[in-house]
Image (spheres, rainbow, N blue to C red):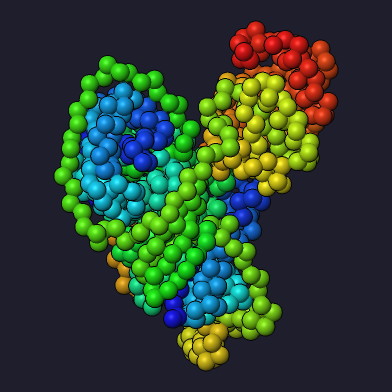
Amino acid sequence: MAYNCVVSVKQVPDTKKITGEAMNDDGTVNRGSLPAIFNPEDLNALELALDIKDKYGGKVTVITMGLPAASAILRESLYRGADDAVLITDRRCAASDTLATSYILSCAVKKLDYDIVLCGRQAIDGDTAQVGPQLAEKLGIPQITYLEELLSLEEKVITARRNIGNGWQEVKCKLPVLLTVIDEANEPRVAVAKRLMKYKKARTPVEIQMQLKQDNPHASDEELKQLGRTKTEELEKKGLLIKQWDLDYLGADLQWCGRDGSPTKVHRIQSVVLTARESKTIEPSDKGVADMIHELISDKTIS
Amino acid sequence: MISVNRNGEVWVFAEQHEGNLEDIGLELLGRARTLGDTLGVKVGAVLIGDEVKRLTEKLCHYGADKVYVLEHPLLEHYQANSYGKVIYDLIHKYEPQIMIYGASACGRDLAPRVASAAKAGLTADCTDLQIGDHENKDVVHKNLLLQIRPAFGGNIIATIINYDRWPQMATVREGVMPMPEPLTARKHEIIAEKVHLTHDELPIEILNEHKREKKVNLKASRIVVSGGAGVGSKENFRLIWDLANALGAAPGATRAAVDLGFIDRDHQVGQTGTTVRPSLYIAVGISGAIQHQAGMGESQKIIAINNDPQAPIFDIAHYKVIGDLNEIVPKMIKAIKARV
């Protein structure tokens, strides 16, 4: 029995590479200075979907909400084995918090045929782990969070093992279901050379337009539009068109999108300033160490 | 979503497992008490399960004025749909202004489900909660919940608020808020709620569960001795164990040391590990990444031992020992054994 999977992924700044230069003077983060990467645990979610496809058949569709540049991770998903990719991009998505994001994603997922929706447990830029459960609620389906092992998939019933921190839990649930996947679940496969050669040419309509504008600096808007249509049709025929959806296409209710749809607002951002403390430097000698220990015993820190 | 109301109570999700209250709910009650007193409103604990009424007294001792008890055989075991539904109903009936949850496996599964259904805001993994004002385009929103959390891998501290869609909700990591002193004299009011549930609200069948005792109780230790990547090897990590043994302390580690296989993950201190606030924290061969500091920065005294004088750990240490840990740690053990 085949299962259709939709994997929700996110392009994130590589927070491990953060340095002083990545911080603006006002304490905000200069995202542009950090490399943009595929959110690590989303790769585990994609791997699980591809694994399901390998074992049972079905289709893997990858969706992301983001700027046009986020199509990079959609191409990466195609290299690894995804069948289809959708970019949700719209200026009106800007400043969406997890609630608005999950609403917009739910509008997109509802347009797709799915048995299983997969997300990484959390994204490294926010570490909230909220979008998965919120998306499940918006879709009206149950969730299995912190999935560390898929145990079985039979007749539209899934059993899986969850890592609940201080132990594990095995659960069973009827499809459709949403899974959030942790990094211990699997080892994501690498890109397949043949697929890479093919899909590196895959483009979204907005990328096609940008490229045409660059290649034809003197063309009129009308000419560019015509060229764009031809190019889009050409890529679509070859299966190299990455779908691009906006909020109008999704039929999203704008009051639940972007800034208006986000109940949480930023009150203040501070860069981490280490608090200077009263401190002593201890000589790394027998006497220095012994005096320190003696002091800590005297003030009852060590009893 | 409920409307902004200044009389709403401050609620805490009182997590219980197999009839035992989890520490996190009690820790949260301590802070909820302060928030409630600042706002001049009552503190409510939300207790869900099957036959859990006997736990209400303890919740009051730790700071609750009221305990909302939701009992039903179908609520014996936690799952997001059923617990989410009954909390959603309770929120719409009583309209609390604030609801906080532990950022435990359960709380992080449950709270977003409730937030989505209630169309309310939710801030994950707060390290501090305060009451304060927010000014926006000349409108001052008074007495909001300031939801303070590290973001961007701990490189910034963000304060999040929500002023137009309530309740204001947040999750808080275990060990971040100090455990309050119980007051046994506090009176308690129990509000037993009728629960309506059907099997449809329980889509998950729990087949098997295995709880594993952590190999170490870092939170309960007065002294924690932690090693980082600088310790060098699993064999050399013996030094950390020896120093911990000499002090009757718990051995801890950084994520790097755990990833290198020096010690089990149960010992990890930091943003993705355990948050500790001991009387004494000894950081050995630890550079002091912000993620590690997030889990130990509140320690009363910190000794840092590192051969790199530029290591960030020295910025928060009370005692800085710059030198080779392989020489210094044995000297410490010797000094302790001579004195104690």
When the figure is inspected, residue A59 is found, relative to residue B157, above or below; the finding is below
Q: Is residue B120 visible?
A: no
Q: Residue B128: which quarter of the image? A: top left
Counting the numbered discs, the total is 0
Left or right: A268 in relation to B227: left
Instruction: Measuring from the top left, give residue B27's x and y in whole percent.
Output: 40, 30
Q: Residue at x 66, y 51 (%)?
A: A17
Q: Residue A81: which quarter of the image? A: bottom right
Left or right: B68 in relation to B261: left
Q: Residue at x 48, y 88 (%)?
A: A229
Tell which residue pokes out farthest to the top in this image: A298
When the figure is inspected, residue A212 is found, relative to residue B63, above or below; the finding is below
Q: Nearer the viewer, residue B23 or A294?
A: B23
Q: Is residue A61 visible?
A: yes
Q: Residue at x 55, y 32 (%)?
A: B217
Instruction: Measuring from the top left, give residue A206's x and y in whole percent.
Output: 51, 76
When the figure is inspected, residue B229 is found, relative to residue B284, above or below; the finding is below
Q: Residue A254: which quarter of the image? A: bottom left
The image quadrant where one finds the C terminus of chain B is top right
